Amino acid sequence: MEQGIFYGVSVGPGDPELLTQKAVRILEQCTVIAAPQTKNGEMLALKIASGAVPMENKTIVPLYFPMERDQDALRAAHLAAAEQVEAHLAAGRDVAMLSLGDVSIYSTCAYLTDILRPRGWRTELVPGVPSFCAAAARLNISLTEMHTPLHIAPGPEEAVLDLPGTKVLMKSGKRLPNALEALRVRGKLGTSSLAENCGLPGERLFPDLSKDAPEAGGYFATLIVKE
């Protein structure tokens, strides 16, 4: 029996219209859709993809990944998810795992490909629109200009703020007050913007944090700090 193919498919930050034509084609052809699921059962990536591709006749495989730093627990979750996927691949079914934003940027899908590929399974990644690119577009600003570096950090790491060029601080909501204070001390509030839930219900945009800044932010909060 021919083995199935594992696809990591980017679904963008929230707006179903931002899925690429290739992502839509792969999702349409795959009979099995693997979707990350939160502890309370929410599958945001599936909800986004469903806005572009009908899912009624698909086999949906929920994958649970705990939100914690314990490496042993995370590794166990990745192995368990890989085994769920392998059962379908071995039966000759292609599997598309959904990934928010772009599949190559802080994506859990990368851990599964690292497990599946050495086991002999064919894997392919389908690129998409990263959340920070969509956020910049919604804020109507550019991220970089000629000769300007771009730094991307997975959270409000203050050390990044001292680097030259544009800084993108992803998933900044939990420590947003600390990040805003760090920007104030450095005199950078006026050149900083924030997008929260970009492309999703409840989207909030703050083009100039020196004039308007939230007291707190959600998980999908992206800070963009320019020179």
Image: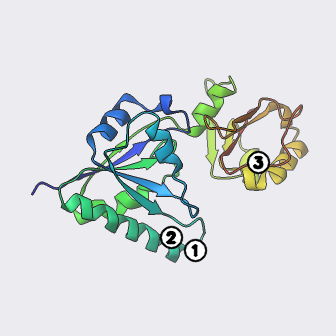
- Mark 2 against mark 3, which lies toward the viewer? 3
Q: Residue at x 50, y 34 (%)?
A: 129
Instruction: Give the spatial CA distance, label 1 vs label 3.
Output: 24 Å
Is 10 left or right of 147, judged from the image as shown?
left
Find residue 4 and report its horizontal and vertical position in percent: 21, 53
Query: Which mark is first along the chain, 3 or 1?
Result: 1
**Front one among 109 and 60:** 60
What residue did someone put label 1 on?
70
Find residue 119 and report its horizontal and vertical position in percent: 25, 65
How many numbered circles does the render carry?
3
Find residue 187 and report its horizontal and vertical position in percent: 88, 38
Mark 1: amino acid: Asp
Instruction: Give the spatial CA distance, label 2 vs label 1.
Output: 6 Å
Mark 3: amino acid: Gly
Mark 2: amino acid: Leu
What residue did someone put label 3 on?
217
**Front one among 205 and 54:** 54
| Name of the residue lying farthest toward the bottom | 72
> The C terminus appears in which quarter of the rendering?
top right
Q: Secondary structure at mark 2?
A: helix
Q: Residue at x 65, y 27 (%)?
A: 138
What residue did someone put label 2 on?
74
Does the CB distance between marks 2 and 1 fall below 8 Å? yes
Q: Residue at x 83, y 53 (%)?
A: 178
Render colour scheme: rainbow
